[in-house]
Amino acid sequence: MAPTGLERVLSLLVAERSGDYGIAALDLRDGSTASVRGDTPFPMASTVKIAIAAAYLADVDQGRRTLGDMIVGRPAAKVMELMIVHSDNQATDQLLAALGGPVAIQQWLSSHRITGIRMDRTIAQLLRERGHLADSKDVATPIAMVTLLNKLDNGTVLAAQSRQFLLELMSRCQTGTRRIRALLPAGTRVEDKTGTLDGITNDVGFITMPDGRRVAIVVFARGGRDRQPVIAEVSRAIYDYFADSARNALALFMQMR
């Protein structure tokens, strides 16, 4: 079921701005999803690093790897920290190479029936070819990315310990203070991963609401101006919608007592 009121708000918000926006918000408690251009592919940029981390952690869960395995002289846990917290591209490609390259990530996604996400290139290749971002490579739809986030959170693809490890890294993301986090109330827990290329500004992750409910959020932005402020406004609109829904539900409960 889609929260149509939220979809209207988000559609109006981005319609007033230049550029193209793809948005998805999923209530992880009841599965309701709101989206704007939810089935349109957008360049992922570094948001793909969530899938790379998840694929490695899934191997850890299955006993094929450990977080202590050395990757170019550093433990895998440290390499993953650099990739998620600092968005280090070299560390990303090192971890990706250990997994078997982009094809391994695509196979992992397919094995979990996550469609609509396509990884074709290493980060180094992507940066070399960033003048061709209008192609169909290395893209995801907002619905596909929020599906990945949902599966990461609900235990479908990762064991509890690996899930917690990844979320803790995402909670320390240092590259997105002006995006999802920017306009949320102080103290709001956010776990996210940004993505940035020429003309591309993305942020995807989780928001924890005051009542403990968690919301997965995806905002892809392409072209136009003020992409970071718009991502912040979209995120606040999503937060306010779910906060108001919780307040209304509580008020109704109190009236029925």
Image: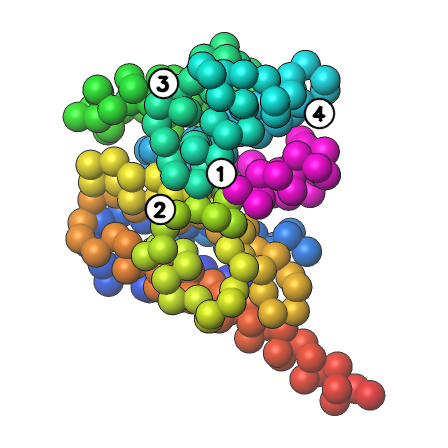
* Position above or below: 38 against 96: below
Q: Disc 4 versus disc 1: distance between alpha carbons?
A: 22 Å
Q: Disc 3 versus disc 1: distance between alpha carbons?
A: 19 Å
Quick check: marks 1 and 2 in contact, CB under 8 Å?
no
- The residue shown at (70%, 37%) is 161
Which residue lies under the disc numbered 2?
Answer: 175
Which residue lies under the disc numbered 3?
Answer: 122
Q: Looking at the picture, how far across and down is residue 102, in whole percent?
A: 44, 16
What kind of residue is marked 3? Thr
Q: Is residue 163 magenta?
A: yes
Q: Disc 2 versus disc 3: distance between alpha carbons?
A: 20 Å
Where does the magenta region start and end? 144-169
- The residue shown at (36%, 50%) is 176
Taking depth in this image into account, of 70 and 90 the one nearest to the observer is: 70
What kind of residue is marked 2? Thr
Q: Characterize the magenta stretch by its predominant secondary structure.
A: helix
Which residue lies under the disc numbered 4?
Answer: 61
Q: Circle 2 sits in a helix, a strand or a loop, which is it?
A: loop
Q: Is residue 36 left or right of residue 3?
A: left
Q: Looking at the picture, how far across and down is residue 5, in whole percent?
A: 49, 67
Label 1 or label 2, whichever lies nearer to me, is 2
Question: Splitting the image into 4 quarters, where does residue 127 fall?
Answer: top left
- Which quarter of the image is occupied by the C terminus? bottom right
For marks 2 and 3 on the same chain, the one whose residue lies earlier in the sequence = 3
Label 3 or label 4, whichever lies nearer to me, is 4
Dot 4, crowdedness within 10 Å: few (<14), some or many (≥20)?
some
Dot 2, crowdedness within 10 Å: few (<14), some or many (≥20)?
some
What kind of residue is marked 1? Met
Q: How many marks?
A: 4
Question: Which disc is residue 145 wearing?
Answer: 1
- The residue shown at (29%, 44%) is 201
Dot 1, crowdedness within 10 Å: few (<14), some or many (≥20)?
many
